[in-house]
Amino acid sequence: MAGFGLSTFAQANISPAKPQDKKTIIMGAKIHVGNGTVIENGYLIFDKGKILGVGDATVAKFDLTGSTVITANGKHVYPGFIAPITNLGLTEYESVKATLDFSEIGTYNPHIRALVAYNTDSKVPATLRSNGVLMAQITPQGGVISGSSSVVQLDAWNWEDAALRKDDAQHMTWPVVPRFRGGFGGGGRMGMTSPDALKERTQAQINELDQLFTEAKAYTETDKPTVTNARLAAMKHMFDGQEKLFITVDGQKDIIAAVNFAKKHGVTPVIVGGDEAYLITAFLKDNNISVVVKQPHALPNNLDDDVNMPYKNAGILANAGVNVVLSIDGYWQQRNLPFMAGTVAAWGLDKEKALQTITLNTAKILGLDKTVGSLETGKDATFLISAGDALDMKSNTVEKAFIQGRDINLDNLHKQLDRKFSEKYNAEKK
Amino acid sequence: MKKILLSLVLVFSATLLFAQQTYPVNGSYDIKPGLYAFTNASIVVNANQTINNGTLLIKGQTIQAVGTGITVPKGYIVVDLKGKFIYPSLIDPFTSYGIVEAARTAGGGMGGGGGGGRQSIFTSTKKGAYGWNEAIRPETHVNALFTADSKKADDLRKAGFGSVNVINRDGIARGTSAAVTLSDERENSTMLNTQTAANYSFNKGTSQNDYPTSLMGSIALIRQTYYDALWYAKQKEEYNISLEEFNKQQTIPQIFEADGWQNILRADKIGKEFGKQFIIKSNGDEYQRIDAVKATGASLIIPINFVKAYEVEDSVEARSITLAQMKAWEFAPTNPGVLEKAGVKFSLTAFGLDNVKDFWTNIQSAIENGLSQKQALMAVTEIPAGMIGIADKVGTLEKGKLANFIITSDSLFKKTNIIEENWVQGKRFIVTAKKDGPVAKDSVNNALAKKPEVKKTQPNGSLIYPFSAFGTAEPLKQEAVLLKNATVWTNEKEGILQNADVLLENGKIKAVGKNLSAGSAKVIDATGKHITAGLIDEHSHIAGTGGINEGAQSSSAEVRIADIINSEDVNIYRQLAGGVTTSHILHGSANPVGGQAQLIKLRWGKLPEELKFAGSDGFIKFALGENVKQSNFGTGARFPVTRMGVEQSFVDEFTRAKEYKSAMAVKGNTVRRDLELDAIVEILDNKRFITCHSYVQSEINMLMNVADSLGFKINTFTHILEGYKMADKMKARGISASTFSDWWAYKMEVAEAIPYNGKIMHNVGITTAFNSDDAEMARRLNQEAGKAVLYGGVPEEDALKFVTLNPAKMLHVDSKVGSLKAGKDADVVVWSDNPLSIYAKAEKTFVDGIAYWDMERDVQVRKDQQAERKRLIQKMLDSKKTGGRTQRPQAMAPRLYNCESLEDYSLELTELERNHSHE
């Protein structure tokens, strides 16, 4: 009963792991490198948080002295999954206003930074890690330009320590003509505004955005602006390439318009959402555009669409040669990210390529592919060991996970509550 | 100014065709004899009788004689109509002519649909001894509200109308309508029938009451009003003008405005419950289910505001038009002809036309598409006259009837025909001046004559069932099928069988086992496949319409999802594609006592009634927590706003129900029938079962205690995310649990929701299920079951039962569905892989042995659909080229419901109408 009392008291207070102090070797695992290759019986050596080597365990020979050896025969090793575009840590309970820190007021907020509101003490991240999600792009929402995201690893004392890449991207929502809400056989709430008026309104918003980009570029080109404008200044690194531009847009025409808009301003955007991107794969490929497919577990956009279109979408894009990244709406939902990749694999994409959509492809659009996203020498030792196929809920069993070589605690609030009450009922049985 | 005065005087003197006895006259009386003889005309007396070379005599406002060989007496003005035609003037049985339509203020609702910051309104704001709900306003009488509208009258006369039924289209019980002529005389002279009909609709209109917010609420209110009226007639304690008027109106015709064939069926069903046969005004889509419409036996009033073609030049924009919209464009003009062929009695109405001038264009179109001229004439003369009780006065040209007729240049339905004059109550109105006279501008006839020839619209497509994407022209067949050599998850003591067969015959499972003989059954090789029972969703909100919450009051036990099942919802097909075969359609969670649930099978393409799971027990939705106390929406003025108040809501409801039950036992029929309490009494009598939306342990414990103390049972806790904290107490009471696999953090009451919840409850011995409450997640219930393996290691065989046998048990249908056993319904899914795996796809989903989902067939269906869209797009382009009218496509996001959806049905209807008139 003492243990029961302790776990109650310590609910979800899980300390970040200590830095790696010993070279570690994983032996005998099926290693999913993250770049498309698989090593059936592999090894992975890492020290001081970095990968020293990955290869075939049947031919390699090691001096194991002074090293920790983890035998993982028959188990799977994956690069840590990365959840892009999430308000993780920016909110705790969706319906409680005091916990909502992801959507600032205002239309153009390039100066808003998500990182500073990221709460490492949130109870949510620990529930993601136990399914293999080890990194996330903490992203603001709202307005036309929402602000800057940052990439964090999910085992830190504070946001500063959590940051893998600060201010990696600006996030923008492309103005589009709103869709009507379906009514009882047609019509809807916007029925009072004509389609032409709606179109005009949208074009006016795009024109305003164009003006803003033009002004920002001019502003950031001078060293001494006549007045200081935090908004314009915040857009500087978008133009010099240090910060990416993510544009949320779904319709095929709108995607083309958004890409052309960005290119006009010298920026290659990442398209987010992209429900109809599968219809314009050649355009996307030609323009080297990555697409973040939002929510493969979704209903089709149109009544007449293939009922399984949302499952197939990412695979069609990836098979056409587009760099595809998977994401899910929300924060607590991110623990299902691996199953999005599983879905995409079920519906037409090679499994290892599907894995890439939540690892290496993601790292690429976050500007982090030199350090994370795949299990290659020199990269961060951020990975997980699962007893089974981690992209399938039936077999996802994350037994160990490492972030930058640190052996992280996979406990979480949910496991603790499970233990607390299972113990209660077990005790009653006896 | 002088000029205006002068013309007014002229008009005034001209109008005195007949005397208004009670009115004083300023100056000398000037009453005209009004004796006319129309000679040498083709007189169409009625649709069956035409007199060639006939004479029509009128005196004042009355027809004196019709026939041949009539001698014209002296004193008659003779009008020689050689070569012309005389027809009875048209009658529109459904107009709001002469009624000022009250603007709909942002009406009731839960704050969701309603206006921001307004007060909750529980009872009528109308002063006086009226009923509690403003939407029930039978005390409204059009004869007292009507004021002639000379502009509208002129428009209608130009189209050939002579009299109309005037309806005050506001409210659910709308009171009486009145028939008037379109003469410009004083209202005292034009009234034909002061009470033509009692009128109804599902739309609460300008009523300030919050209740009802939903279609099912409107239906419940109508039902209750009938019962209240019956009770009222026999009691002496209450004076209630609304109920008194309601009762008085039961002997006259009853007109129900119910747009869409599904609403025709709904209205008719209510009528039949109370021995009424409504005349139903619909929206012209009856062709989609003509047999069902005909079976109601109802006479209809049908608009001819046919869908305009969409602008489809832009292929990207055209993508947002659905196949159903395109097909509706093609089929709409066939509707009157289809109704005629089916033998349905109907009138036509100009109601809903952008412009009454389009009336003839569209009648022509209907005739080209199968409506006979004879039927067309009847549908605008005799039939409407009969419907609204004015057949003794108008509708045919017979002695003694009113001199309401039109003079036309030709046969009425010829395209070149021109309506020259329209005589109303013996008064002449020139529609199209003769060549030597002044040309009447803007006349319908000119418009008609100039209109470019619209290409004949002959549908080439076929009707599909349902009238939606993925509908099929031919009903899908039930077949005898042997599924061979699969991994069979029996959910029975046999467990999971390897290399086994399942035989389906006559909609039932004939046998499960190894090496079954096929007999005459079609053999499907299922090697490498997995076969399970169809999935069952204990908590769903698909296949409903008009809102799934009636949350204006803390109890809405009287509302029934059964009333609003929508068979045309594409989510039925989408969920079949995820292996779902049975769904429990629940009321939302806006109030402690919600509405009655309906269990359906996903029989795609069948009628709403046919979707219902026959013989299943009735359930009712209860709810606890944040939603019912309106934490995140609403005005905060409706009781309860705390979990403490929630308890008392239940205590009060059940206490009242017990008193009601005892009163019934003692006093019988004299007790006012209360549909809300009826449902609660059913619970007390173990005839209706509770599924209660619940989250935190305190409230779960509370309801169990309330149930114990008031003597009722809780069948199921649904959502039940803290069930793991109460599992022992639930188990002790035999309560089932239907939860989410892994949802949490979306609101405060799920702060401690854990994905191990299902496992813990299961291990304690509770019958546990995973449900969706979400049209998307319902497509992957098998994967949700897979999460029971992930979180807590539930054995695979047990995990699958979370979405098959266990929900069947808690819904009391496990004797029919939920496992693979000889004799059970052939609700079966063939999976490509282990059904708990992310890689599993439903390849075939059978309901009653019919493969409503077949992945291979779906490929073909989509191909055909693309071809059909292409054909229709081309047809629309052609139609535009030849002058057909068009509308811009508007992209629509489909409407989806979950527990928290708060919709305002009447607001939607109002907007829909406005939107339509904007096209």
Image (cartoon, rainbow, N blue to C red):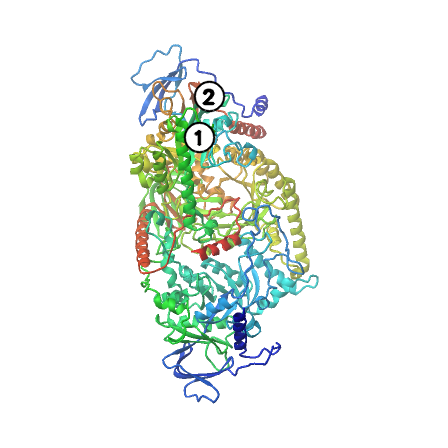
For the N terminus of chain B, which image quadrant? Answer: bottom right
Amino acid found under the numbered disc labelled 1: Leu
- Where residue A364 appears, as percent x and y from the top left, is 36, 27
Residue A109 in the image: above or below residue B602: above
- Residue under label 1, please give it: A232
Q: Residues within 10 Å of mark 2 (few under 14, many from 20)?
A: many
At 37% from the left and 12% from the top, the residue drawn is A64
Q: Which of B425 and B347 is in front in this view?
A: B425
- Residue under label 2, please give it: A408
Q: Nearer the viewer, residue B126 or B215?
A: B126
How much space separates mark 1 and mark 2, taking CA atoms?
Answer: 40 Å
Q: Which chain letter matches label 2?
A: A
Q: In which quarter of the image is residue B675?
A: bottom right
Question: Is residue B376 found left or right of B722 in the rendered image?
Answer: left
Question: Is residue B665 found left or right of B627 in the rendered image?
Answer: right
Residue B381 in the image: above or below residue B674: below
Q: In which quarter of the image is residue B694?
A: top right
Residue farthest toward the top in the current orientation of the protein: A65
